[in-house]
Amino acid sequence: MRSAITTATKGQTAGAMMEVARRALGAKHHEVARRAVEVAVGYDGENASIVGEAAILLRKAGSKADDVDSMFGKALDLDPTNADAWLEWGRFKAETRAPHGQVMRCYERALEADSASLAAVVGFAESVLEVIAQEKKLGAGAVRGNDRRTARTLLGKARSAIDSLLGRRDGDAAARERLLVAKGRIALEQEGASETVRQILRELEKIAPRSVQARALRDAMNRAEGEARVGGNS
């Protein structure tokens, strides 16, 4: 009975300290938030929910990169299915200019944990494109470590995830815009200036005529068409 009471008390104390951390963060008292998080994890450091939120709060409180990475690693060891933690870790790695392959892997794990997450699907697609762009400059596998998958495999997985989610987001113009732009960029990488990309641009013109991202996709399409014409004439 004594251990059960002690465990419950630790959980309650950790929960109370996390509430202190949330409020301190909202008031921009970052040092208070960081300290409260540390105390909470000290009391209940095997609780996946506590540690997962702790990692996210430390990131938002501007903690040292090593401390944030360590907390995310611990949180995801405790619960590898925490899609929100994988997403936040991916965003943190992108912000701190971690290798593109690490960013991609975080978003991929978020996608695997929650295939209906718009942020996970788009984040994975965009990070795959970044990885491929870097590998064109530095060589295949240069930014992915031991990941031996081909660019074609990665692009195919990202496109499949987008197609699956597009079917669930028919009435959501903002979500469809993000998904279609990502799909268009992938299709351009896979197929060049193709009818698929033209169809995507036509839909984007209908649902988001002032979209900066759609305009960038159209510009990329125009460049690809110009390069194709030059190549055909040479």
Image (spheres, helix red, strand yellow):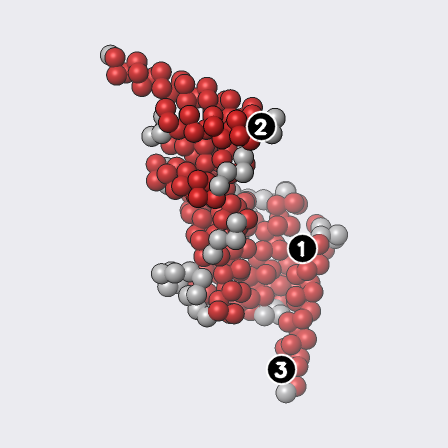
Proximity of marks 3 and 2: CB atoms separated by less than 8 Å = no
The span from disc 1 to disc 3 (Cα, nearest Å) is 27 Å
User: Would you call the spot at circle 2 few (<14 residues within 10 Å), some (14-19), or many (20 or more)?
Assistant: some
Query: Which of these two is toward me, 87 or 181?
Result: 87
The residue singled out by tag 2 in the image is: 29
Q: Nearer the viewer, mark 3 or mark 2?
A: 2
The tag earlier along the polypeptide, 1 or 3, is 1
In the rendered view of the protein, which quadrant contains the N terminus? top left
Disc 1, disc 2: CB below 8 Å?
no
Q: Which residue is mark 3?
A: 231
Give the quadrant of residue 201.
Answer: bottom right
The image position of residue 175, as x and y in percent, is: 61, 45
- Decide: is 119 above or below 25: below
State the SS at label 3: helix
Q: CA distance from mark 3 to mark 2?
A: 59 Å
Q: Horizontal placement of 18 versus 221: left or right?
A: left
Residue type pointed to by label 2: His
